[in-house]
Image (cartoon, helix red, strand yellow):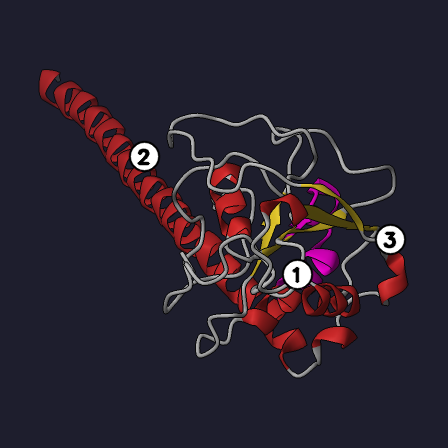
Amino acid sequence: MAKPAKSDRQAKIDAIRKQQKGADKRRGYAIVAVCGVIAAAIIAVPLYGIISDEVASSQYSSLAIDEIGAPADVCGEVTTEPAADSGTHVPQEQQVTYDTSPPAFGPHWNIAGVAPVSGAREFYTADDRPEIEALVHNQEHGYTVLWYDETIADDDEALGEVRGIAEKFSDESNRRNAFIAASWTSEDGDAFPDGQHVAMTHWSAGGAGETDTANQVGVWQYCSEPSGAAVEEFVTEYPQQDSPEPNAFL
């Protein structure tokens, strides 16, 4: 009678082992499935960003710049103040505290945030934006910078308008299309004036061809929302050649 008992016990052990193998196999399948989901997410996130960028770009590609965003009257009056520190370079590791938000002039790094070369970009987010000290150097050489705050950054439609405006300056055959759109965050300095979420800045020589540094001014215009019409007016009034160092173009 001992033999059947042994067989029964073995059968129970075999059943337990079979159940364990099945559980292990299911666990393995689950791990593979989870890894697959994670891998797909890793691929999908940047791909979604690229696709979203393309969609945002194509939405405005057929429009003239003055048809993008709000009319020019969403922007206030252009203001200026005497500028200084043309040619004043500080070490690249040194952070500069500027008196205005955002800066239109001041001490800066001796490197460009953006150079007018093939493949250069005109639109930047908080994640990939050049440092402010480098962008001020760009302004010394004639760039207009459109800064947008976190309210715009969190609004997909408004951010798409900023991107659409910036891409109107992407013609690489004309290196005088000196324009950059970049984010301004609470970590960069004070907020823009109440109700204003976009700022345009330019470091003016006091007119194209002006060489007297006493005539240099910083130029600002604040807007409640993006306006391609206002940008067009601003860069027409303050072109790249109206800057302290227009011909030493980075």
Q: With respect to residue 61, does 120 lie above or below?
A: above
Where does the C terminus fall, quadrant-wise?
bottom left
How far is the residue under mark 2 from the one under mark 1? 78 Å
Q: What residue would you read off at disc 3?
A: 77
Asked whether disc 2 touches disc 1, contact meaning CB atoms under 8 Å apart, the reply is no
Asked whether disc 3 touches disc 1, contact meaning CB atoms under 8 Å apart, the reply is no
Nearer-N-terminus badge (2/1): 2
Nearer-N-terminus badge (3/1): 3
The numbered disc on residue 74 is none
Q: With respect to residue 204, does 110 lie above or below?
A: above
Residue placed at 40% from the left, 53% from the top?
A: 40
157 in the magenta segment: yes
Residue placed at 54% from the left, 52% from the top?
A: 244
How far is the residue under mark 3 from the one under mark 2? 71 Å
Q: Name the residue furthest front.
A: 212
> Badge 2: how crowded within 10 Å, few (<14), some, or many (20+)?
few
Q: Nearer the viewer, residue 96 or 60?
A: 96
> Badge 1: how crowded within 10 Å, few (<14), some, or many (20+)?
some
Asked whether disc 3 touches disc 2, contact meaning CB atoms under 8 Å apart, the reply is no
Q: Is residue 166 visible?
A: yes
Label 1: state its secondary structure.
loop
Extent of the magenta region: 146-163
Q: What residue would you read off at disc 1?
A: 207
Q: Nearer the viewer, mark 3 or mark 2?
A: 3
Q: Residue 232's x, y, as percent?
A: 72, 70
Q: Nearer the viewer, residue 60 or 221?
A: 221
